Structures are given as C-alpha cells and as structure tokens.
Image (cartoon, grey):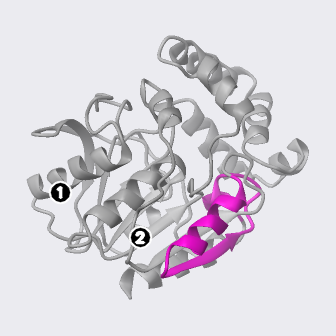
Amino acid sequence: MGRPGIAAERETAVARLDAGVVEYRLDRRGETSVLVFHGGHMRAGLPLGEEVFAELGCTVLVPSRPGYGRTPVGTGRSPAGFADASRELCRHLGIEGVAAVVGVSAGGRTAMAMAARHPELVRRLILQSSVGFLPWPDPRTRLMASVAFNPVTERATWAAVAAMMRHVPALGLRTLVGDLSSEPVNVAFASLGTEHRDLLRWLFSRMRSGRGFRNDLRQVGTDGLEISQPTLVVASRKDGSVPFAHAESLVARIPNAVLVASEAASHFIWLGSDYPAIAEQISRFVAS
C-alpha cells in the first residue's frame, strides 16, 4: 500500500489571489481533502509520496511554495505568509476543510504554520522528514547550497544532474543519495531496488530550485507556533539531510504528536522497506 512509483509530471494551474500568484495541482477525488507542501527543489507538478492519499480516495491539493514552479518568491515569502496564501487558495477552490495538511522536509515549516494559523481549516498535521525546531541546514550544507542552488547557478546544476542521470545513472544516484543519508554511500545505494532507482532518476532529472531554495535557506525557526491538532511525525534515523533530532524536537514541542521512526536509509522515507506499514498508519491517522 502507498508505494511510490514513477508518474508523468502532472498538469498544474495558476490562481491569481489577493496574496499573489500561486501555482497548484488539484487532483479531485472524494470529499475528503489533503493539502501537501513538498520540500526543497520540488513543485506542484512533481508527485511524491501521495499514493497513500489517492488510495484513500482523497482530493489532493499541492501548491508550489514561494520561488518554486510558477509561484513567485514574493507570494507569501515566509511560512506564515504562504500559509495564509494557501488558506485563500483553499477558499478559492471551494475547500473549507482538510483532513490533514502534510509537510515534507522544508515544507514542514509551512505545514506547521498552516495548522497553527488556520485551525478552523486543518484537522490533522503530518510531518514527513520535516525540518523541526532546530537550526537547519548545518553551516557546511548552507554554504554549498547557496553556491549550487542559487537563482544564477541552479539551472546549470540541475542540467548537470539530469545529464548524469541519463549517462552515468549509478554514479549520479550514489552522489545524490549519499548526500541524503547518514549511512555509507554503498549501504544507502544498495538499499534501493531497481524500481526505487528508476523513481529517483526520474525525480532528480526534473527537480529545479528556482528562487525557492534560497528563500528556504533564509527562513528562521518556527518558535511560537501553537499547534493543537493531532500530529504524526515520520522520520528516519538515517536521514542525512534533516537529522532525526528535528523529528524529536517536533514531538517534544507539539502536544499531540506521535513519532514514527522509518527504517529508510535516507531522507526518502517512502523508499524504506517498512513504508507499507507506515502508509497503513498514515491511512488510519487520516481516516480517524
């Protein structure tokens, strides 16, 4: 259940709101809705880890966060600002309640702001490999990212990544997965089956940073948020991008939070051998 697979890049639309322009994808299914904020280098057209919600028959709304895709960086530049823009987007689309808001990686800050600022809309919060209440990223990663993924260099960086995925995919995957895991590169790479490697090749070949990742790096902590909703935190102890300590900080500070430790060998919890069981927990949580 809920296993991620390769899918074509999805069609998106643009809403012109009082808060600004927002790119979004709306996959309409049933009456229950889920709002997803993906992490860095992602945009609305790239689905990842959404299968569990589709299998529940949920309508899934995915906005591109500021600076990603066709959402200008000036639309709700901060997590709080974009949470308010997303509330307006929901109203624009006729969505007056979401069963869960989902925050992935750097998108977790916006999901938390959404839950705290709009409790009348959000019933539950799910945080996956999410940045928590600790500084992020570490100084070394911040420096490297500011060089490789700034608005001037990011196009060339991702073009080089796409070329590696076409011509030397094993080397490319080892390089990128190694950066996303605290395990030795060989161990992290060996944990990936053929289907997972194909998925990551597809995903890495389509990622872009735009002005979004630099904006993510400028965000500060989420202190002061009062989150009252039941919260499910899913993270791997082997995550090399967002350390497990972030997940621990989340469950320590959010009153109704439960931590689920993934066995995934990297930041990508959906690729862990135990993800079907985790997907079952997510399904029960959303449906509860």
Instruction: Look at mark 2 in the image and give the residue it sits on.
Output: 125
Q: In this view, does 178 lie above or below 211?
A: below
Picture quadrant where residue 228 is located: bottom left
Residue located at (76% from left, 62% from top): 237
Q: Farthest residue toward the front? A: 224
Q: In this view, does 251 lie above or below 102?
A: below
Q: Quadrant of the C terminus?
A: bottom left
Instruction: Look at mark 1 in the image and give the residue it sits on.
Output: 90
- Mark drawn on residue 37: none
Q: Can residue 1 be seen in this view?
A: no
Q: Farthest residue toward the bottom? A: 288
Residue located at (30% from left, 70% from top): 58
How far apart marks 1 and 2 lie (CA) works out to: 16 Å
Structural crowding at the residue carrying mark 1, measured as other residues with C-alpha within 10 Å and reported as few (<14), some (14–19) or many (≥20): some
The spot of residue 165 in percent (x, y) is 66, 27
Does the stretch in magenta take in 252? Answer: yes
Picture quadrant where residue 13 is located: top left
Local secondary structure at mark 1: helix
Q: Are marks 1 and 2 in contact (CB under 8 Å)?
A: no
Local secondary structure at mark 2: strand
19 to the left or right of 62: left
Q: Which sits in the foreground, 15 or 114?
A: 114
Give the residue type at disc 1: Cys
Residue located at (66% from left, 68% from top): 248
232 to the left or right of 181: left
Q: In which quarter of the image is the N terminus?
A: bottom right
Over which residues does the magenta segment extend?
243-272
The spot of residue 112 in percent (x, y) is 41, 61
Q: Is residue 218 above or below residue 61?
A: above
